[in-house]
Image: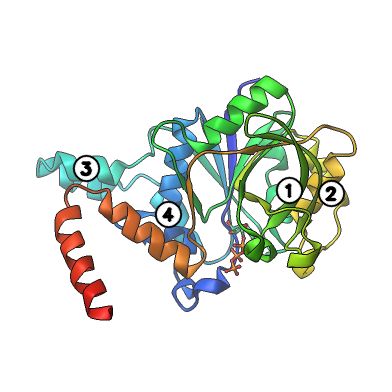
């Protein structure tokens, strides 16, 4: 079955990025000149997604405005013949249907995904975290996962190795390799300590899930950090369905962390023909000063 629906949970407080996130959603922080969430929406479009639900919360109206049509701005740019700027202002609005719902209380990622129950209906769907950007110019990360889902007919989680020293930041898998980049899951623990982690294979912000996840989410109690964790619901799902993990190819940036945001800003700027030359000169001078 083709995956055409995706959910972007973007309701979190973003405390790691305070004070910026007091009034600006972290998903709207620009990487060079484009909001983080737009990169994720573009990945969804390039992966064949036609319908997208963004889970927001109080104070996240900038996300809703960003995906709305800016009629007055477009009229002025059109009148002045500024076609390139007009294209940028239009963005992705005519390429995908974007819907919004609010998570009234930030009870955790699992609870945010549960807010998509009626949107998903009886269809499998993708989950793309609003602060995880993955770059793969040949095959988008989500497309890699939806292809695996279509082949296997069961839920697939996007993973990569993160090194043992980082396991306490992620949902960590207990799994066995069964094919090229593919694992069958046996278990999963949210943010384990280094000595308790079953591996260093981490879930990194991309999932393709069957609708059976909603029954599991409904039964899931508060877990790590006092939040309803998607990880715990996936563990329940494993009792009734096979769940797979796919080691996707691509560079992943955690925009919700300062280091991830800075790394993305530098890497994306270096890829831009209009910025690259001058920026490299600046970086060289700055790095030399630091030596
Ligand atoms: P994070 O773990 O990054 O939490 O959530 P956060 O609140 O956004 O950020 P910090 O840790 O306080 O800095 C992972 C993803 O789940 C969403 C977030 O928006 C992010 O995309 N999320 C988290 C929700 O939508 N609702 C929640 O209740 C929690």
Question: On the rendered structure, is 225 left or right of 206?
Answer: right
Mark whose residue sits in front, 4 or 3:
4
For mark 1, give the secondary structure. Answer: helix
Q: Is residue 96 above or below residue 234?
A: above
Mark number for residue 86? 3
Q: Earlier in the sequence, mark 4 or mark 1?
A: 4
**Contact (Cβ within 8 Å) of mark 2 with mark 4:** no
Q: Earlier in the sequence, mark 1 or mark 3?
A: 3
Q: Is residue 98 above or below residue 33?
A: above
Q: Residues within 10 Å of mark 4 (few under 14, many from 20)?
A: many
Query: Residue 63, how many percent across, how many down?
Result: 46, 55
The residue wearing badge 4 is: 36
Q: Earlier in the sequence, mark 2 or mark 1?
A: 1
Q: Residue at x 16, y 50 (%)?
A: 274
For mark 4, give the secondary structure. Answer: helix
Q: Nearer the viewer, residue 176 or 141?
A: 176
The residue wearing badge 2 is: 218
Mark whose residue sits in front, 2 or 4:
4
**Distance from label 4 to label 1 (Cα)?**
23 Å
Q: Residue at x 26, y 44 (%)?
A: 88
Q: Earlier in the sequence, mark 2 or mark 4?
A: 4
**Distance from label 2 to label 4 (Cα)?**
30 Å
**Contact (Cβ within 8 Å) of mark 4 with mark 1:** no
Q: Nearer the viewer, residue 239 or 58?
A: 239
Q: Nearer the viewer, residue 114 or 254?
A: 254
Mark whose residue sits in front, 4 or 1:
4
The residue wearing badge 1 is: 114
Q: Residue at x 54, y 73 (%)?
A: 16
């Amino acid at each position: 079955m083709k995956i055409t629906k995706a959910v972007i949970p973007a309701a979190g407080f973003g405390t790691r990025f305070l004070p910026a996130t007091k009034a600006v959603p972290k998903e709207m922080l620009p990487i060079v000149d484009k909001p983080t969430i737009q990169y994720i929406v573009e990945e969804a479009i390039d992966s064949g997604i036609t319908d997208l639900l963004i889970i927001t919360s109080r104070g996240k109206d900038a996300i809703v405005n960003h995906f709305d049509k800016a009629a007055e701005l477009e009229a002025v740019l059109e009148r002045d013949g500024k076609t390139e700027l007009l294209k940028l202002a239009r963005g992705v609005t005519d390429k995908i249907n974007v819907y919004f719902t609010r998570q009234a209380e930030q009870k955790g990622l699992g609870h945010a995904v549960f807010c998509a129950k009626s949107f998903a209906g009886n269809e499998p769907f993708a989950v793309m975290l609003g602060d995880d950007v993955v770059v793969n110019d040949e095959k988008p990360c989500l497309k890699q996962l939806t292809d695996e889902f279509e082949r296997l007919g069961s839920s697939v989680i996007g993973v990569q190795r993160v090194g043992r020293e980082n396991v306490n930041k992620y949902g960590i898998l207990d799994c066995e390799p069964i094919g090229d980049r593919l694992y069958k899951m046996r278990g999963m623990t949210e943010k384990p300590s280094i000595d308790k982690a079953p591996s260093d294979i981490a879930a990194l912000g991309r999932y393709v899930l069957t609708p059976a996840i909603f029954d599991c989410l409904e039964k899931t109690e508060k877990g790590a950090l006092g939040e309803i964790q998607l990880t715990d619901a996936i563990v329940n799902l494993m009792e009734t369905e096979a769940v797979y993990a796919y080691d996707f190819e691509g560079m992943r940036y955690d925009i919700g962390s300062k280091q991830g945001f800075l790394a993305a800003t530098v890497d994306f700027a270096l890829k831009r023909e209009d910025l690259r030359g001058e920026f490299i000169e600046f970086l060289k001078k700055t790095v030399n000063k630091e030596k």
